[in-house]
Image (cartoon, rainbow, N blue to C red):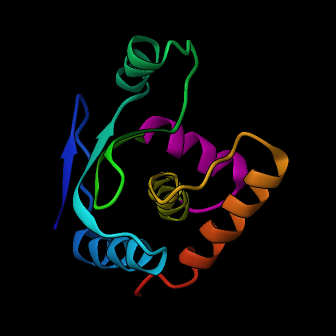
Amino acid sequence: MAIRFFQEDITFNFKDRNKTKTWINHCIRDEGYELQDLNIVFCSDNYLHTLNTTYLNHDTLTDIITFPYQDNPIHAELYLSIDRIRENAIQLQVSFIQELRRVMIHGVLHLCGYGDKTSALKEEMRARENHYLNVFPD
């Protein structure tokens, strides 16, 4: 099992790699899944927008796109827009790292079967996000 971090078209110094790997592994196991491979790619709005239009046919900005290749064990990629996360953190009046963790665990929860297309699903997703944000190893 491996979690790897990459960056595309930006420079981003992510310092909490080991704690984040432990946290994500805990979440995946807690949700009843196993992890094979997870690539987490930090990128810009432009890079993520190109992926969104090319692969999902969505002409919108977003903070994360999740590409699941295999369900269980999980083999997937998460693409996170650092631009969007920074902007959202300011708008939501939370720290950048808090918003980064929320977006990251949001993608992981999608890999564990959670959706967010309805109000009820969004509420359930937010509850799980909050749960896992509270257990991040500080």
- Magenta portion: prevailing SS class: helix
**Which residue sits furthest right?**
119
Residue 61: percent from the left, percent from the top?
55, 24
Is residue 136 a member of the stretch shown in magenta? no
Residue 59, compared with residue 6, is above or below; it is above
At horizontal 46% and vertical 36% (from top left) the residue drawn is: 83
Residue 60 lies left or right of residue 32; in this view the side is: right
Is residue 88 a member of the stretch shown in magenta? yes
Residue 61 lies left or right of residue 5; in this view the side is: right
Start and end of the magenta stretch? 82-95
At horizontal 27% and vertical 65% (from top left) the residue drawn is: 35
Q: Quadrant of the C terminus?
A: bottom left
Q: Nearer the viewer, residue 76 or 84?
A: 76
At horizontal 79% and vertical 43% (from top left) the residue drawn is: 118
Res. 98 image quadrant: bottom right
Residue 39, compared with residue 127, is above or below; it is above
Q: Tell how many labels.
A: 0
Q: Nearer the viewer, residue 77 or 19?
A: 77
Q: Quadrant of the N terminus?
A: bottom left
Q: Nearer the viewer, residue 38 or 47?
A: 38
Residue 123: percent from the left, percent from the top?
78, 59
Residue 135, compared with residue 36, is above or below; it is below
Residue 92 lies left or right of residue 85; in this view the side is: right
Residue 125: percent from the left, percent from the top?
67, 59
Residue 79: percent from the left, percent from the top?
36, 39
